[in-house]
Structure formats: C-alpha cells, structure tokens
Amino acid sequence: MTTDPGSLSPGRARRMSLALTMLALSGPAPAAAQTPSDTTTLILLGTGTPLPSPAAQGPATAVTVGDRIFLFDAGAGVMRQMAAAGLPYRGGPITGLFLTHLHSDHTLGLPDVILTSWVMGRRRPLPIVGPPGTDEMTGHLLAAWREDIAVRTEGLEHGVPGGDRVAVSETKGGVVYDSAGVRITAI
C-alpha cells in the first residue's frame, strides 16, 4: 500500500487521533509479558480521498488489540485491504465498525464489510457505531441487498444463520466502546 503522509486532511488527522487515543487507552502489557495475542497494532487500510487513485484505497483504519479488530471507516476496497494486510476476518472477528461520518468515501465499503464477513463465516450481528443517520443508511443498504441475502439464507448457498445481521448504535459523541482494556471515544 502506498501512502503519501502529506495527503492527510485535517479531518483525517482528527480521525487518526481518535484511533491513536484508543491505542493509548488500551494500555499494552508489560514488555516481558507481551505476546502476539495481546499486542496493539494500527493498520492504515486506505488513506485516499473521494477522488479515485491507484496509489490509495478508500479511507479505512484497523486497530487490532490481541485477536480483536476495530475497524474505523469502510472506504472502497476495505475488505481487499484487510485480506492484503493478513487480517483474519474469516469467522467475523471484527469486534466493531466505527464510522466517523457518513460521506460516501468513508462508507462505500460498508456493504462489503457486512456481506463478505458474513459469507466468510461471521455468525453474530456486526456491531456498527456511527453518527446520526447510520441506522437509516445501514437499513437502506440491507434492503438494497435483500435479494442477495435471500439467496444466501434461503437458496442454494445456505449462509451462516444470523451473520447477515447488524447491531447499529448511533452517537453524537462520548464513549462508544469500553471493554477488556479498550475504550473508544467518539469526538
């Protein structure tokens, strides 16, 4: 993945500070006790703008804490970038998807995250946290893909039961996730 560090807009910088705040609050284990299963990693999956570029994918950032994956935004190509980064989305270990805002460049990959993680074996509703309008947008996306979902649940494919579900929470700010040493605050 090629990234031009000078291409971060002020808004992207704020969103990055949100992810970095989460990193700071998660608190790594002492160096002697740290193992690959409890490390924290920030992965820039896409840093592009709304304008297509072969050098950058749509905005998306993954923060992994142990085996948990926290995904911030879902720009175009997010699932391909997760696969390229070696993130194990098979079976649905995406702990939560956090949308910073609902611009198309930050949400074009949302149907891909919902449907691909399900097809790959996600068995529980995908937690999605975002600003007001997230529930309505997600509902429209699921309605747009209802024929595909029906084929995969009732047709020949017999998709994993429940994996096509989402659990949307809307927020105007504040703590949106606080569990097992990780706290995420929307600003």
Image (spheres, rainbow, N blue to C red):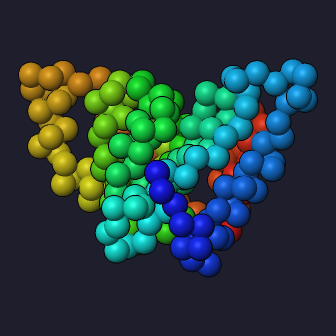
Residue at 40% across / 49% down in the picture? 78
Of residues 54 and 140, which is closer to you in this image?
54
Q: Position of residue 168 (x, y in %)?
A: 46, 51
Q: Position of residue 61 (x, y in %)?
A: 54, 52
Could you say which quadrant of the image residue 122 lies in? top left
User: In the orientation shown, which residue stands out farthest toward the bottom?
Assistant: 10
Q: Is residue 186 visible?
A: no
Of residues 48 and 91, which is closer to you in this image?
48
Quadrant containing the C terminus in the rendered view: bottom right
Of residues 52 and 78, which is closer to you in this image?
52
User: In the orientation shown, which residue stands out farthest toward the left?
Assistant: 156
Q: Position of residue 114 (x, y in %)?
A: 35, 43
Q: Is residue 46 visible?
A: yes
Residue at 33% across / 32% down in the picture? 118
Residue at 42% across / 38% down in the picture? 84
Q: Is residue 39 left or right of residue 134?
A: right
Q: Position of residue 25 (x, y in %)?
A: 81, 48
Residue at 64% across / 70% down in the picture? 13
Q: Is residue 138 left or right of residue 185?
A: left
Of residues 170 and 184, which is closer to you in this image?
184
Q: Is residue 98 left or right of residue 29?
A: left
